[in-house]
Image (cartoon, rainbow, N blue to C red):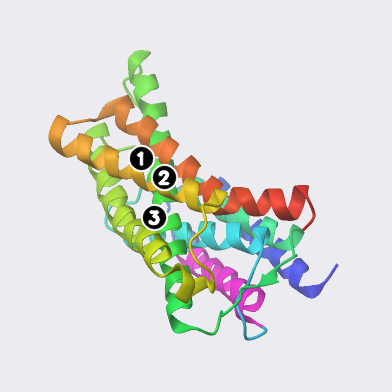
Amino acid sequence: MSPFSLAALCVSAAYGWMAWRMRSVSPQSFWLRLGLPATLLAHGALLYVSVLGEGDIRLGFGNSVSTVFWLAALMYWASSHGAPLARVQSWVTGLASAGTLFLAIFTAAHVIPNSQMLALRAHLAVSFLAYGLLAVAALHALLMTILEKQLHRGAVAVGAAPPLLTLEAILFRTIGAGFVLLTLVVSSGILFSEELFGQPLQLTHKVVFGILSWLVFGGLLLGRHFRGWRGRTALWWTITGFTLLLMAYVGTQFVLEVVLGR
């Protein structure tokens, strides 16, 4: 086992321990407050080595998934100090653990053409930020689905979770920010495909799924504004949009690299 894979496994184990502890103690406990940023920093260093360590940008299934989950954990940690949600925090940390494990297992990566271009680097950075925000939104949607089912079964206490209306407000703020970034990604990819990728726009699976995801999230925000969509309607649109977004890049990378071995 390489030193890099061993380090990734150690970081994954640290994330996993914290995700487990968050289910029984407050995320604001001293060791979690100290350990989570330290583990995020270590994870970020591993990603730097994997993606940028050789000068060019190198992306593959493993480090792409790991980057998305790291950004989701980083953004949630940075934005939730005022009102942390223990269950979502544990889920996000668990995903980061899985993402670091992927980094150790799926080590294949390929150089992105023209990766020295500042415009392409900015495009990729915004893409991953959109992925991270919308991953957090999907986790919020899953939590709301679980809480709603518990309430329908007559459960009065649902742990330390805040009211559904509070979660719903957080959900749509997160989706709104993610949609703005996703709009930048889709529009720049369509309008400047040749400048960014060295070829005219082609309707690949990545492009089709990306546009479908953008349409779903845009339709959800319009439905929310004009028709007051909420509850299960909003939740299923969120989960559908994020699933399409995953298929846009991570799904196609998985098929090409893991299934087909290209």
Give the residue displayed 49% in from the left and 46% down from the top: 209
Q: Position of residue 91 (x, y in %)?
A: 50, 45
Q: Position of residue 16 (x, y in %)?
A: 61, 52
Give the left or right position of residue 8, taking residue 130 as reference.
right
| Label 1 vs label 3, nearer the camera | 1
Give the left or right position of residue 198, taking residue 2 as reference.
left
Instruction: Give the amino acid at mark 1.
Output: Val
Magenta region: 33-53
Q: Residue at the far front: name it.
A: 200
Instruction: Give the amino acid at mark 2.
Output: Ser
Query: Which residue is label 1 attached to?
Result: 216
Query: Which residue is label 2 attached to?
Result: 213
Mark 2–mark 1 Cα distance, whole angstroms, equals 5 Å
Give the residue displayed 26% in from the left and 51% down from the top: 176
Query: Badges 3 and 2: C-beta atoms under 8 Å apart?
Result: no
Instruction: Give the amino acid at mark 3.
Output: Leu
Give the left or right position of residue 157, taking residue 64 as reference.
left
The residue carrying pointer 1 sits among few (fewer than 14), some (14 to 19) or many (20 or more) residues within 10 Å by Cα, namely: many
